[in-house]
Image (tube, grey):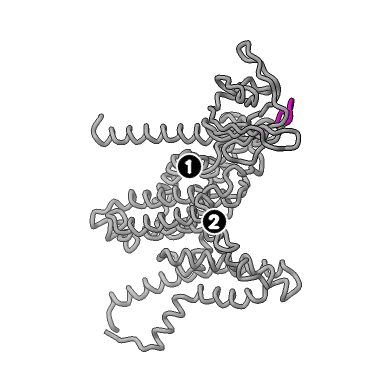
Amino acid sequence: MKAYTTKEKIQHLLISNAVPIIFILMSAIAIPLSGFSPTYLVQEMLIRLARNSFLVLSLIIPILAGMGLNFGMVLGAMAGQVGLILVSDWAVVGIRGLLLAAMIATPIAIALGYVCGAVLNRAKGREMVTSYILGFFVNGLYQLAVLYAFGKVIPISNSELVLSRGFGIRNAINLAGMRHALDYLVPLKIGNLNVPVGTYLTIGLFCLFIVWFRRTKLGQDMRAIGQDMHVAGAAGIPVEKTRIIAIIISTVLACYGQIIFLQNIGTLNTYNSHDQAGMFAIAALLIGGATVSKATIPNVFLGVILFHMMFVVSPMAGKQLMGQAQIGEYFRVFISYGIIAISLALHAWKRQKDRERARRSLRGEA
Amino acid sequence: MFNRRNGFRVGLLVVLVLLGAYLFVSGKQHQMFVDNKEIALDGKAYPAEAFVRVAFDGKEPLELASGDRDVTQVVGPAHTVKIEVLNESGDVLKTLDGDFQWVSTPKGMFSVPAFLGGAPSPMVDSPREE
């Protein structure tokens, strides 16, 4: 077996971690330019890490099952929002309101996850684009339900939630009664920093769940399917059922992630909050060094920190450099979403190369 | 077919429904009027105090003069209340702690005189039904 030289090892390390390294360098340049104090940046990162990590973590299980990045996580986000709308109408507040919203949303998320999984089983190899378009389709159903069914079919008694015509939900819902209900469930202040301990404990439990889940029979089945679906099928693993379970778990977790996200924000934008949930979570995961076929828990945390660091500092850095905050923001958007495109293209290229290599090895030396 | 697995599922469903009901009842926020007007209940009159400071569930207190009415939010069915009776210069003359139960929206007004006078329940008819 060939032993790698130090140079080759460094080269491999740099290539395999190119995306996080680029973002770390960009942050290193942008942070001093922005002029923000370290305390402010640490507080922002603490809040944003708590706000987004759960959503990003929900993407790991479908990747384990070889289904790529689950753009269909917006289905779960929509289910979570339905739960929050109903709980807001019933005026159930605090952590109990969040738990009740999660309980109401769970069966909706399971049903949507099942549909999504069944559709993706009919589109093997094209899961990402299929789930992306499925997200648009279900978004249409969600908008129909929220615009017409709520207040007509589903009774809504709180006049603050209903449009003036008597049915349909208003564009923005104030979640004041639930704001930070999980974040500051266990209050902790270190100096000037407020630490959302409740959310971190929840995220910690979720990480333990992922670690445990990977070791279970189901987790091992998913890993086997992720490596080679046909071999796994031949070995007696129920491929389609396992893939559906992976998507259901991801959708339910995305539903909880969206509830955690919105309790942190404190306002539910009825028609738009879920729109960017998938894109932001996927961008953060890829920036953390994950690929379409491999994602780990450290990728999630590194990605969320780097992605949101750029969110915070780039407008100010742009203003300092060019005199306009918008330039920095455009730059951030361009880089962040460019990363998704590059990652997807690299994945397709790598798969093609792997196939060619496999064909060559079957043919043997010429 | 009712086997052990289905029994477990039904049991889980029942637990979840009960948990949902508990969360609904214990997390429900109520709008409650707080009234410091003289009131007659079951033929007995309860006079209003000149100045009172009322705090529900350890939260920010409300200050009411005789004849005043205010509104606050309470969460869940069981509450604690601390009432301080004040004189005109703001000195505390008497403090009374206690607890009470939320009854229903039509009975959504807390009567300070009824509580201070030891009425069976301080919750009286609300001036406005939600």
Residue bearing mark 2: A51
- Depicted A132 relative to depicted A150: above or below: below
| Chain of the residue under the numbered disc 2 shown in the image | A
Which stretch is magenta? B65-72
Q: Please tell me which residue lies in front, A36 or B35.
A: B35
* Left or right of residue B83, residue B25 in this image: left
Residue A64 pos. (x, y %): 37, 60
| Residue at position x 76%, y 73% in the image | A323
Magenta segment main secondary structure: strand
| Chain of the residue under the numbered disc 1 shown in the image | A
| Residue at position x 56%, y 39% in the image | A93
Residue A249 pos. (x, y %): 40, 50
Say which quarter of the image contains residue B9. Answer: top left
Residue bearing mark 1: A99
Image disc number at residue A271: none
Q: Is residue A222 visible?
A: no
Q: Residue furthest top?
A: B43
Q: For mark 1, does the 10 Å Cα neighbourhood hold few (<14), some (14 to 19), or many (20 or more) residues?
A: many
Residue A203 pos. (x, y %): 45, 56
Say which quarter of the image contains residue A48. Answer: bottom right
| Residue at position x 33%, y 73% in the image | A359
Q: Please tell me which residue lies in front, A251 or A205.
A: A205
Give the position of the N terminus of chain A as an image quadrant: bottom left
Q: Please tell me which residue lies in front, A197 or A316.
A: A197
| Mark 1 → mark 2, Cα distance in angstroms | 17 Å
Residue type at the position of mark 1 = Leu
Dot 1 or dot 2: first in sequence order is 2
Please state the total of marks drawn on the protein image. Answer: 2
Q: Are marks 1 and 2 on the same chain?
A: yes
Q: Is residue A7 magenta?
A: no
Residue type at the position of mark 2 = Arg
